Amino acid sequence: MAATLRIALAGLGTVGAGVLRLLEENGDLIAARAGRAIEVVAVSARDRSKDRGVDLSAYDWEDDMTAFAAREDVDVVVELVGGSDGPALALARKALAGGKGVVTANKAMIAHHGLELARLAEQSDAPLRYEAAVSGGIPVVKGLGEGAAANRIERIYGILNGTCNYVLSAMESAGADFAEVLSDAQALGYAEADPTFDIEGVDAGHKLAILASLAFGTQLDFDAVETTGITRIRAADIAQGKALGYVIRLIGLADVSDDGHLFQRVAPYLVPVSHPLAGVTGPTNAVVAEGNFSGRLLFEGAGAGDGPTASAVVADLIDIARGSRAAPFSLPVAGLKAAEPADPGHRRNRAYLRFVVADRPGVLAEITAAMRDAGVSIESMMQHGQPDDTGEPVLVAMVTHDGPESGVASALALLEGSESLVEEPLVMRLLG
Amino acid sequence: MAATLRIALAGLGTVGAGVLRLLEENGDLIAARAGRAIEVVAVSARDRSKDRGVDLSAYDWEDDMTAFAAREDVDVVVELVGGSDGPALALARKALAGGKGVVTANKAMIAHHGLELARLAEQSDAPLRYEAAVSGGIPVVKGLGEGAAANRIERIYGILNGTCNYVLSAMESAGADFAEVLSDAQALGYAEADPTFDIEGVDAGHKLAILASLAFGTQLDFDAVETTGITRIRAADIAQGKALGYVIRLIGLADVSDDGHLFQRVAPYLVPVSHPLAGVTGPTNAVVAEGNFSGRLLFEGAGAGDGPTASAVVADLIDIARGSRAAPFSLPVAGLKAAEPADPGHRRNRAYLRFVVADRPGVLAEITAAMRDAGVSIESMMQHGQPDDTGEPVLVAMVTHDGPESGVASALALLEGSESLVEEPLVMRLLG
């Protein structure tokens, strides 16, 4: 058996502690599969004295985790500190530049700096791995970059944020509005105290940017990801969707047009109940990749949590121990194309539009006239007025026929500033 | 870029032609991802003159494919001939013994001789890969052997045969009996002229034996796979299942008990409609693996077909070109444990029992007495008699409470030879 793979672990939150527990519990199996022992030699975190439920006495402690990069007894640095920049990035840069491998669960860092880090890794001939950064324990980075490597991937899409999916499926089963369910989710640990990154689609956007680069061989471009969160969805939208045969899911979706433009969007979509993603409830993630030979592949599992994330981190370590040499983004950095962002206006789809309107004559005429003037064809419309004329605002929902997104945008522009509209219209596309 | 990886391809059926087409269509991408060109230098098949829709003029032709093993200009032999023994096995043995890599889509050969071939590969330090042998284009061999490698896998199960799943979902939507749907499936190319291997569960058994070895680190033991096919399922069973909230799927399921006994079964199961496998319709495959850290992982996609299978074959070639050194069954051969088959009698589950009985007094009493005497507790029972007393046999279906399989077996033993039963009772377990 070859020499031990020696690890330094930065960050001892739930995932870091999970990695230590996994290496201990399944150590024999991991060594047998890896062909060599995988041993943690040093750890670092902010607070040495905190009780994490794991015994740290066997490991060297470093107050400054960047010291890992200089240690000769370390082969691979596992970065579980988080944050797109700051100490995590400094450590990753230093470790790779010094020829050490880096394994990370840090989606923000990879989404923002993955290209630079991949270049560093290439220059040093050091491995850079980030399976745990995308959808926790699901081996989707491996699935795309290796399993589907023979394909031109035509489209990827999926449920990339467990918090949002938990909230949406809880709204679905409870018939409750967003805010109500969010506080339950926070109490249960499915949403953070500050849930902004999750509920506004930023976290899913990080993952989508990474998957897009892997799938299409394009340079990472997180800034071009269009993100819309789930905060404006109401119980009434979910009920309308259901009546039409759809559930609402926060979907990350990316494709590349024939002329090489990259489209990346995170937004709530209406998903047909017969679609595999419609059955994905709770904090689960699922990714679909459509390859030109493989057809539709689906990967599903726990999108977060200490166990699943640790499973992905250690899978990367086993790969490194086995000597795997796949490039971080499946292609050499020089082979990753810079892709212009696509103009979504040309995209065709059906859309769900929901208006909150003043309950008075003429409002429907105003909305439908704007649709007509923008060339948007309405397939169905639902208005549930108040039982009596209470003067309360009412909801009007409609579904358009298939058409360019620019048409819907024009119609909404025509309605901008209208006194009939009590709040900004909500637009969700139907997943086709 | 490193030297070209040189391939000899044995077998030019739809999959072989698909591999040639894929290497041609996506050749640039494949070379970029592999880090070197992958080039077919020689091909072999039974009939040289047959039109396969691909131009073979660029490749050397060998009438005897075992000649590949001796060619110095070949690095990897791709075996797409099929058959557990015979020429395919002779070629694989010879190629591996001579230090050449082998990539195969041949589940029968791997299920029967995988251990021997892995040993040969290990002795020669040559790669042996078979992603295409299990569930076509789904990277599940990679997902288990690499993606989930850090886990003790506690259970695997899935839909492993596209023909059966097509037939069952067609029966479901058409309300038709097995025989009727089978001939449609044959006409549409979803079932072979001789469908025995598919509909009797043998093909799924091959895949299950392979997955079990990969997942549990046990030696392949196809002979111990218990197989029951789908031929006896009637439209009435599907209707009964539906009324109870279940669909019927042919499931391959394996686990290892705490004392190391290996259980492997292919049989129709009642799957709750809320389970992800219930939504898998048509010729799709899906595999679930439950890891002790990853939790439940699901891999889904096309289980067969030239494109998906070629995608898996070429993914293996890319891995080999990249220098991947994972062991064929994730562990070194010496690390694969010989596992005794488990006694299914101890397994506990709920069961669906369906009887075809003579329409006369006392039959129900006879059946329920047998259940009582065997200690089997009945949860629900449905009998739909003829509208009039026609004397035609009638169906009686029941679902038992959770209990050991030995109880149901004893009850059926008590009923054996009963003149009340017009045909052998059908037993299907409920997937828990």
Image: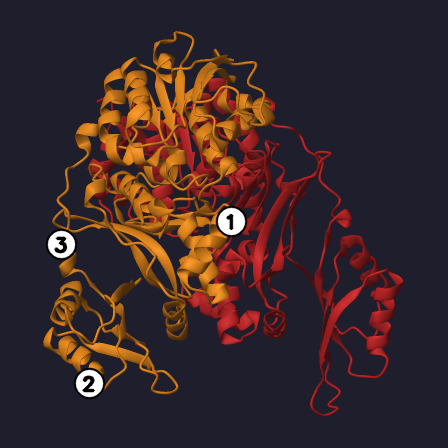
Chain colours: A orange, B red
Q: Judge if badges 1 and 2 mark residues of a common chain.
A: yes
The residue where tag 2 is placed is: A362
* Label 2 chain ID: A
The image quadrant of residue A390 is bottom left
The front one of B131 and A144 is: A144
**Disc 1 sits on a residue from what chain?**
A
Tell me the kind of residue under disc 3.
Answer: Asp
Q: Mark number for residue A343?
A: 3
Q: Secondary structure at mark 1?
A: helix
Q: Label 1, on which residue?
A: A187
Determine which of the numbered discs, if any, sits on residue B218 in the image: none
Q: Quadrant of residue A246?
A: bottom left
Q: Residue at x 36, y 37 (%)?
A: A141
- Quadrant of the snapshot with the C terminus of chain B: bottom right
Q: Earlier in the sequence, mark 3 or mark 2?
A: 3
Does residue A188 appear left or right of residue A265 in this picture? right
Measure the C-alpha gap from mark 1 to mark 2: 44 Å
Q: Nearer the viewer, residue A371 or A418?
A: A418
| Position of residue A74 in the picture relative to residue A326 (left or right) | right
Counting from the top left corner in percent of width and height, residue B327 is at 48, 26
Label 3: state its secondary structure. Answer: loop
Q: Residue at x 23, y 47 (%)?
A: A225
Which of the marked residues, 3 or 1, is nearer the chain's N terminus?
1
Residue B281 appears in the rendering: no
